[in-house]
Amino acid sequence: MAIYEYECEACKYYFEELQTFEDAPLSKCPKCGGHVHRLISPGAGLIFKGTGFYITDYARKGKTNEADAEKTSTSPKDQNNKTKSPKESSKEKSSKPDKDT
């Protein structure tokens, strides 16, 4: 269903009519019976109602978004104060090239 705007050519009466897309355009003015033509209008546009809509509301499952990543990430101070497990410290040593060679 759509709301169409019409204007009478004889009396300049302006009115709107709710019609389906299959309906034929109106041809007679409801006031004077004169010929009417349908006006071209930009439409109502997009209307959002409610408290708000965010891109994170529709995130795909299995993927993290930036807002979640910021919440779960730790500050650089906290990362430096973490104690490393023996496996992590041995990985760092083995990945560094020797200065002797």
Image (tube, rainbow, N blue to C red):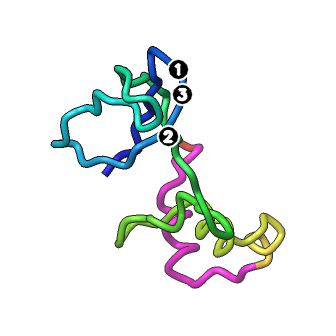
Residue visible at 28% across and 27% down? Answer: 27
Q: Quadrant of residue 5?
A: top left
Circle 1 residue = 11
Residue visible at 40% across and 37% down? Answer: 4
Estimate how packed mark 2 is, as few (under 14), some (14 to 19) or many (20 or more) residues with alpha carbons within 10 Å: few
In this rendering, the answer to whether 19 lies above or below 57 is: above
Q: Position of residue 38 (x, y in %)?
A: 37, 25
Q: Position of residue 7 (x, y in %)?
A: 47, 24
Query: Is 46 within the magenta?
Result: no
Instruction: Please state the total of marks drawn on the protein image.
Output: 3
Farthest residue, direction top: 9
C-alpha separation, residue under disc 3 versus residue under disc 1: 5 Å
Farthest residue, direction left: 22
Circle 2 residue = 101
Circles 3 and 2: CB distance less than 8 Å? Answer: no
C-alpha separation, residue under disc 3 versus residue under disc 2: 93 Å
Q: Quadrant of residue 49?
A: bottom right
Q: What label sits on residue 13 in the rendered view?
A: 3
Q: What label sits on residue 82 in the rendered view?
A: none
As drawn, is 42 to the left or to the right of 69?
left
Q: Position of residue 29 (x, y in %)?
A: 40, 31
As drawn, is 80 to the left or to the right of 40?
right
| Range shown magenta | 82-99
Q: Position of residue 44 (x, y in %)?
A: 53, 41
Estimate how packed mark 3 is, as few (under 14), some (14 to 19) or many (20 or more) residues with alpha carbons within 10 Å: some
Three-letter code, disc 3: Tyr
As drawn, is 77 to the left or to the right of 101?
right
C-alpha separation, residue under disc 1 versus residue under disc 2: 98 Å
Three-letter code, disc 2: Thr
